[in-house]
Each structure stands twice: as C-alpha cells, then as structure tokens.
Image (cartoon, rainbow, N blue to C red):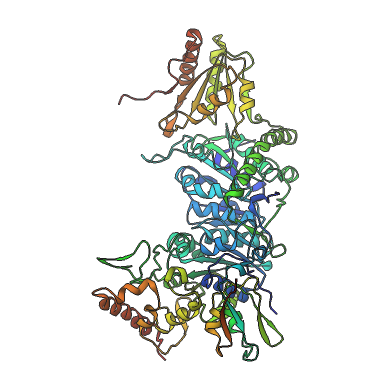
Amino acid sequence: MKLSIGAMVEPGSTRTNKTGSWRTFKPIIDVEACIGCGTCSMFCPEGTIYKVADKYTIDYDYCKGCGICAHECPVKAIEMVMEEE
Amino acid sequence: MEIMEGSRAVAEAVKACRPNVIAAYPITPQTHIVEEIARMVADGELASEYVRVDSEHSAMSVCVGASATGARTYTATTSQGMALMHEVLFNAAGLRLPIVMTAANRSLSAPINIWNDQQDTVSERDSGWIQLYAEDTQEASDMIIQAYKIAEDHDILLPVMVGMDGFILTHVHEPVELCPQEKVDDFLPSYDPAYYLTPKNPLSFGTIVYPSTYTEFRYMIHEAMKRAERKIIDVASDFRDKFGRHYGGLIDTYEAEDAEVLIMAMGSVIGTAKDAVDELRSDGKKVGIVKVRCYRPFPAEAISEAVKNAKAIAVLDKNISLGYEGALYTDVKSALYNENGPLALGFILGLGGRDITKNTIKSIAEKAQKAIKSGRVEKDSEFVDVGVL
Amino acid sequence: MQEELFAPGHRGCAGCGAAIAARLILKGSGKDVIIVSPTGCLEVISSPYPESAWKVPWIHSLFENAAAVASGVEVALKSLGRKDEAKVIVIGGDGATIDIGIGALSGMLERGHDITYICYDNEAYMNTGIQRSSSTPYGASTTTSPAGKVSFGENRPKKNLPAIAAAHGIPYVATASIAYPKDVIKKVKKAISIEGPKYLQIHAPCCTGWGFDGSKTIEIGRLAVETALFPIYESTEGKVTSVKKVKRKPVEEYLKAQRRFSHLFKIEGGEEELKKIQDIADSNAKQFGLDQ
C-alpha cells in the first residue's frame, strides 16, 4: 500500500464508506405529498437527500436512517419503515 | 567580518533565508534573537509576517499552520518554552513540515534556572526533529541556512532545530562573517512545498490513522531521518563550496587521528575542549575531540568509525536522563556495543550554567588515561565537580 | 444543485448534530476556504485515514492549538500573496474551544487575524465519552459530573464564551443553532465577509451524549432556543445588535426530553434545581430581551 507523506488524504473520499448499511429504519418519501421545501435535505447529517426536479430523493447508499428528515418534514411526507433483511 | 552578538548573527542568517512567517515569544536566553528580527521587520529590512504569539505552544502551532500553507517559517525558543512546545514538535514532524527553529539551550525547572545546559533539546530527541548543535556563533548562524536546505528537501521534509548554548553563544560578542544575500538566495531558493493547503487541491492534513498503518507512518519518518544523514553531510560541503566555511558533516574531529583519548561532546564546550587539547598535546598527551554536530539522526556509524583507533572515549553530557546517565553517553555506548570499541566514560557537567573550564576537560582526559592504564572503567558515569551534599 | 462540501460516508452517529453544523457552515462559506479543526468528534468522524469527508482544504493539528494553527495559515496566505485565495475558518468543539484552546483563541482574537472561529457547542467532551466541559450546562449529568446520591450533576453554569470573545472588541460575535439552518448559513456568510477576527458559537445537540433519539436532534436544538437556555444573538464590537425573539416555553419541555437531565425529575430536591435552571433561562431572556 502506498502511503501519503504526513497521512494526507484526497478530498471527499469518505464516499467509499457506504454508511447505508448502518440503517435499521428507512425513510420513504411520499412524492405526492412532498411540497419540495427542502427541510429534510437541509437537516440531513449525511447530506444525502437531493432535489430532483421539484421533489427530493434519498441516496440510500449513505442514509443512516436517523429519521431527522421524517421528524422535521412539515407535511409528514416521509415515513420511517423497518428495513428488511 | 563584524563583531556582533550571537543572537544577532542568527537573526541575520534568518533574515537572509527570507522566511515568510516568524512566530515570536520571549524567553531568556532566546529573546535577543526575536528582538533582532522584530527590529529588522520594524525597519522594513525584512518583509516577513511577524506573529507575536501568546505562548511557545502557539508559536510552534503558528509555524505548523503557516508551513502547511506553503510558507517558510522560523521561531526560536529554549527550556520551558521548548517543553511547552513538546506535543507540537511531534506534530510538526509527523505532518512532515520543514520548520526551522533555534534552540538557545537552557536547563529545565525545577529548580528554576535560566542558564545553559542542553536538557531542553535532548529531552526532545524522539520528536522527529533533526537536531544540530553549534560550536560557536558563526556556526549557529550558518547552520540556519543549512537547516532550511536540509529540511525543505523533498526527500527529507522534516523540521530542524539548531541548538546554540544559551548565554554562552546567544549573548557573546564575536567576529562573524555574514552570508551575502545574493549568495544565500542562490544557495537556498524559495520554499517549494510538495503539498500545501489550497482550494486548488483541497487535501486533508492530519487525519486519524489506525493501528493498521500508524507503524508505517512512523517508519516513513524514521526513513526520512536516516536519509537526512547523507543530506546533512552534502549540505555542509555545498555550503563550504559556496561560502568557504565547513564545520564537519554529522560529526567533526580535532586532533583525533592518533588520539588515545577522544573527548566527545556537543555545542560550545567543544571550543573549550580544543584549547584544553592544545595544551595537553603540547604536554605530549594524545588527546583529541569528536564533535557531535548532529544528534538526531544519530550518527552511529560516523562515531564508531571516528573512535575505532582510540583506547578510551570520554563523553560529556550537559544533560542527564535522571536515574541513568547522560543521553549522548548512552547513545554512543549503544553505537559501539558490537564494535569491540574503546573504553567509555561518561561525565555529567555544565548543568544550569556551571562553567566548564580547560582544567575540567584536562581532569576528564586524565581519568580516561587512568582507565586505559588500568584497563577498566572505575565509574561508568559520574557527575563532575558535584558539591558535598 | 449545490455541491456538498462535507461528503457522506463520515463516521458520525445517526442524527449527529456536529455533522449538520459542518454541512451548514460549508454551505455558508463555499469552497474557497481553508478549514482548521482541533481534535474532537468532528475531526475523528470526518478524517479516518485514508478517507476524508472534507472537500475543502482541511488541517487537524492538535487539541488546543486550532486558533494558532489558523493564525499561521492566515499570515502565510498574506505573506505568499494568496490572501484572496481562501477564507480561514476554524471549526472546533466546545472542549477544544472553551476549555483547552481558550488561550490560543484569545491570542488569535487579540492579534486581529482575519479568521472566523466557529465553535460547534455540544456541551461536553463527546469524543472521549461525554465528560463535562466548561460549556456543560447547569444540572447536566455527564460521565465526570454524574448525578448521584449527593449530586445533581454539573454544578456550574455554562461558561459564557461569546461574552469573553466580545470582550476582545472584535467586529463580530454571534450565536446560532443548527435548528435554524438559514440563520447559521447567513451568519457564516456575514462573518467571513467581515475583515478581522470573528467568533461564532453554534449549538449542536448530540443525541448520543445528551440521551435522545437521533431523529430529535433538531427538535432538541429548537427547544434550547425556545426556552431561552441558548440565546441566539449577534454582537459587534461588544454591543448586541440583533436577537432571535422567541415565544418562550418552560425549561422542563427541553430538559425532560434528554437523559442527561432525567435525574432532575426523579430525585428529591430536583424541583429546586429545575427552578434554578428556569432562573438561568429567565435571566437570559431578560438580558437579551428574548421574549416576543
């Protein structure tokens, strides 16, 4: 393994660590109910909720399932569902 | 050639190296260096950012931040200030930052004492800093220029501390020849960092390393230290070619060729020892000197080569690893362990500013000769001139 | 879509308030910054070699020296003629900032460096296992200020670092909470646009350390503000220039939602302590005129 001088690291490289595997509950966005306000995206500790067209979508590769998005959604358009094995 | 204080001679060399950032915090006997530099900045002779920090810990931290941003940096400290820097010293070396610092060698408290010994820098020998020790003010000055050249080499990238004995060298007025600016510019081009903090290449510095690779990072620092041995020798001879002065590479010798007794030490005591050796030689005694110019990396090979024909060596330590012996003595003996080398005697002396005279050196040489005659070392390590308790 | 400058894959707990703070700070600052982080949770979760969550230049040196390292970065940029290249920002926890790093921070503020120092305040040493810091609030149980038979937990109020920072006469001091993200972003933008030293303290609840479900990080943060236990304001050269008014809620609503205060509702004499905490909130409300 080639190590960098002084343990320097490339930017944004935690992306190789897919934290979606941590999840117990999975947030599901009801696209019909979503008003596109962006609250969920703003509060996501992983920064893994993106705007696509006028709605939001979750990148489950990284979502840890904390549930902040569902808890803060002003129109309760996100539901936390138990992950299946 | 001009007569000036040792601190000014160092400050002039620092100026000639055109550091971008200087961190300054007062502590005796280092203060005259940063005062001289402050005057240069105030008079517009030196266009450096001069940061009047809140502690030595911050002084070294400012150097870490500035060096990581691609700046050439300088600071100076001693004693308690060096002890306060302790963790930042390890950090600077681990981050592979070529910071250069003067250490105006002084004792450590308690009891508090502001005078010279080398306990401060010797206590930082494991920090990953290259450690050089100057014999006189001219060398303390010239070593700064050499230090940047060594530190900034991309094969090395390690910080360097230049030890100069507090008061004995920092406050003494001696004739010094300053290096002309244009020659220094030629010898030492501006710092070309291998990596630095910039949005153009947003790297992360100082990441957390797990057991799986920590050893490898320590190994890499160690390897850079070993490479520095060659570099220090080369830079010393390049310096001679450019400026006409040479003080040895990792070590230097004096009257050593046929010497039965070799006195080994670091720093200004070498000057006193040379005078003592001259007198001993005129009495027909075969005594010589090995000056240890570089303490880390430790020049084990050079030392064992230099002493191989001697019958006894006397190692002078202005420090003590309490509960054992002087640090240089331990290292020298370890270097010679498998070499079937000469008898070795260790002496703790010059602590907290206690004078070391020619007579002290002569009596040490005499003890070494006695050991040669009897074929055994009576006292492995001893305090010199210790008062009755 | 704005690029995420704090990448996912970091090791923060599910519901991590510090990670939210980091994201919001970088939303405010943009990419032309150099970030200095002291040792702490955010540093550890974001930089496990050979990975880093930071997409901006970032350096971690030690625990107590971030303000001094940042000072070095700032003067280096100046000396190298690269001042326009990046704004210098420190992002450190309350232990690093308010306890062990306060000397270096004071030096940085006093010397007038053009640096924005941001403390994400989660009110204890979370990285080492929830030990008390001088930013731990009155009554909180931590692993070194545990509630016990003869203890109500932390027996001293939060150290007021914004006031200490302001006493340096610096051009901008502000508090904020991750519960009000637009306010955080606005204040970061404002801070970096001002020349000189700036201090921001961002309240960042810690679900693991405070004892609440990770989904409630924002709710808890909001309650701290609404109860006036964490007043939100800005100050310039020592004078308060704006405050976030609130429709105040009793402190119990905030306290009862967290394990670190749960003992106050169980043990004898707890009511007395709750009253003391309400007094702190009342005093904050009065001092800053928080009531709507």
The image quarter in which residue B324 lies: top left
Quadrant in which the N terminus of chain C appears: bottom right
Report x, y in % for residue B104: 51, 40
The image quarter in which residue C248 lies: bottom left
Residue drawn at x 44%, y 74% as measured from the top left: C212
Tally the marks. 0
Residue A11 seen in this snapshot: yes
Report x, y in % for residue C2: 68, 78
Report x, y in % for residue A75: 56, 90
Residue C198 seen in this snapshot: no
Of residues B376 and C140, the one nearer the viewer is C140
Describe residue C85's horizontal placement relative to residue B4 as left or right: right
Q: Is residue C98 above or below residue B260?
A: below
Of residues B266 and C118, the one nearer the viewer is C118
Quadrant in which the C terminus of chain C appears: bottom left
Of residues B214 and B69, the one nearer the viewer is B214
Q: Is residue B349 above or below residue B313?
A: below
The image quarter in which residue C163 lies: bottom left
* Residue furthest front in the image: A85
Residue drawn at x 46%, y 16% as measured from the top left: B363
Report x, y in % for residue B254: 61, 21
Of residues B160 and B40, the one nearer the viewer is B160
